[in-house]
Amino acid sequence: MRQNRVFVRARVFDPMRLFGPGFLALLILIGAAAQLAADETGERIIKSHGFSEFGALKYPERFAHFDYVNPDAPKGGELSYAAQGTFDSFNPYTRQGRAGERAGEQYESLLYPSYDEPASYYGLVAESLEYPESQDWVIFNLRPEARFSDGTPVTADDVVFSHNILLDQGLQSYAEAVRKRIPKAEALGPHRVKFHFAPDIPRRALITQVGGTPIFSKAWFEADPENRRLDKPRMEPGIGSGPYVLESYDINRRIVYRRNPDYWGDAINVNVGRNNYETIRIEYFSDSIAAMEAFKAGEFTLRQENNSKSWATAYDFPAIQAGHVKKEELPDGDVPPATGFIMNMDRPQFQDPRVREAVQLAFNFEWTNESLQYGLFQQRHSFWEGTPLEATGVPEGRELEILQSLGDKLDPAILTSEPVRAHASDPARQNDRRNLRRAMALLDEAGWSVGSDGVRRNAEGKTLKIEFLSDDPVLDRIVVPFVDNLKVMGIDASYNRIDDAQFTLRRRDRDFDMISGGYRTSLQPSTGLYQQYGMEAAAFSVFNPAGISGPDIEALIDNIVAATDGDELIANVRALDRVLRAKRFMVPTWYLGNHWVAYWDMYEYPANLPPYALGVEDLWWISAEKAAALKASGALR
């Protein structure tokens, strides 16, 4: 399910296990089951059941199921959870409108990721793939049995159509990043599709990128091309090949999905033990307080908590005391998203790095954590917190060489300094006076002087204003003290909480000074970095809320995408982490090492949950006996 949760922990992993010593990434090993042939040029062709960006696949050809599933999980029952806000569309591929929960889940892709190995993918709609050692192209062989929910076959023409419509009508940041790298897709037959990759560009992640493209029904779109555009909101759901279809909805109140009884893919190995519910119901609420009351009353039955106060204080109600509701902390082994309070780099008041550093100094994590968040979190410093990709110490070795190669693109201070870390603050005081004095000195240096009214202005007489924009009442108690500290420094700061629809529009249009948000991270970052930090997409990418970019960042992204071994990837990501932190475009906040989950005691999950997914929607299941007992007791209707 889509989560607003931002409190996750970095997984400390062994890079030797992940990458293997001395491998060559241009010959990516696909396990012992990979078959090798040669084309007319003599270049070896690899044919496999899956693909790994680095290293060998864990699961061999014709594996029975993933290790982390329960292959005997029963089918049936209902998953129900809450969403906050509103929805006015079932098209998740446009900047316009707010798509309903799971609107994109009905679309399957050629490959499916493994949850217990990084950047490894196995055939879903595709039963196999073929590519040369050069990775100049890739061919996917589709499963002939794959069907859309209307019973029509999934064909190579549908895959080509999906690729092209995403370039023509999809998000601009995606289209710009993909068009110059993957210029052509062609159907070689009803169940065979080929993607051509542009010459003279790095090959890493191109195969996984096309393998993860959602597959649309060409016939469905072409039956009404004007009303079924990918760049316009619409309430009519599309046709996908996934296990669930939309059953009903009540705008801004409820969405119900039901398992397709004719779903084609139940028996294939990547789906064994997955997709276990008969229905998935999402209840919409205006705020988390109303949602919590509804959960206590059993109006929905599973809640992934994102509020530390609620987790610490709200789970003491009759159903908990009677044992009808279970509260668990389950391990989260993924890399944390880089979350925090994001500054809009298009705003003139944030052009000076001294102003950005001063804004950072106004936030007191220690006091916030101890006084408002029950001491449950840890301070985040890095964009790859707690992993070998995190920059530490003064740069040395290969990382130093990479940074030196950037020449005058780089701030020279980075070469001789430890990476920027979140400042320490006094946990006993909301406004750490030492940090505020330092911040005010920085603002003075930047030319923002305090007037007789206590407000800072520059030489042109313009006031230093910062509006913090939010749509989440949970943030009120966190942001208001931060805004108060900004005011103490002479900044004309305000906190403006608006409704979900306004917030969505203003965030997408980058019409804000500051918001709470984040950037997704990965153990194997690649071409997605262009949408997050790239120069071409900086003006319009919805994945780059700050609009941060620069020639130093761009050069490092190029290096990361071109990396041909694990050591080179790690060194370049560390360099990028160091550069991003030095930009100070975000006030780093916090992370947590667990998932917070509460549920009515009818859910069960595999004994060996995977490190990279909690799997509530596709790995868990309903115990019919427990559900019947809850209803018999009167605890649930």
Image (spheres, grey):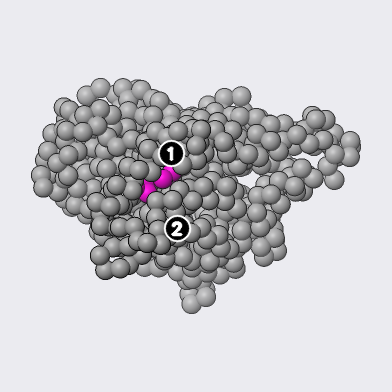
Residue at numbered disc 1: 432
Query: Can residue 393 be seen in the rendering of this structure?
Result: yes
**Location of residue 489 in the rendering, given as x and y in whole percent from the top left corner:** 39, 51
**Looking at the picture, does residue 311 appear above or below residue 454?**
above
Q: Quadrant of the C terminus?
A: top right
Q: Residues within 10 Å of mark 2 (few under 14, many from 20)?
A: many
Q: Nearer the viewer, mark 2 or mark 1?
A: 1
Q: Nearer the viewer, residue 29 or 375?
A: 375
**Location of residue 436 in the rendering, given as x and y in whole percent from the top left corner:** 38, 43
Residue shown at 25% from the left, 54% from the top: 446
Examine the structure image and report whether residue 144 is included in the region drawn in magenta.
no
User: Dot 2: what SS?
Assistant: strand
Examine the structure image and report whether residue 362 is included in the region drawn in magenta.
yes
**Location of residue 304 in the rendering, given as x and y in whole percent from the top left corner:** 62, 40
Residue stretch in magenta: 358-363
Which image quadrant is residue 346 in? bottom left
Residue type at numbered disc 2: Ala
**Location of residue 83 in the rendering, given as x and y in whole percent from the top left corner:** 63, 52
Query: Can residue 542 be seen in the rendering of this structure?
Result: no
The number of callouts visible is: 2
N-term-proximal mark, 2 vs 1: 1
Q: Nearer the viewer, residue 209 or 13?
A: 13
Q: Residues within 10 Å of mark 1 (few under 14, many from 20)?
A: some
Q: Nearer the viewer, residue 183 or 249?
A: 249
User: Dot 1: what SS?
Assistant: loop
**Looking at the picture, does residue 215 appear above or below residue 94?**
above
Disc 2 versus disc 1: distance between alpha carbons? Answer: 18 Å
Residue shown at 32% from the left, 25% from the top: 15
**Looking at the picture, does residue 507 appear above or below residue 445?**
below
Numbered circle sitting on residue 565: none
Residue at numbered disc 2: 493
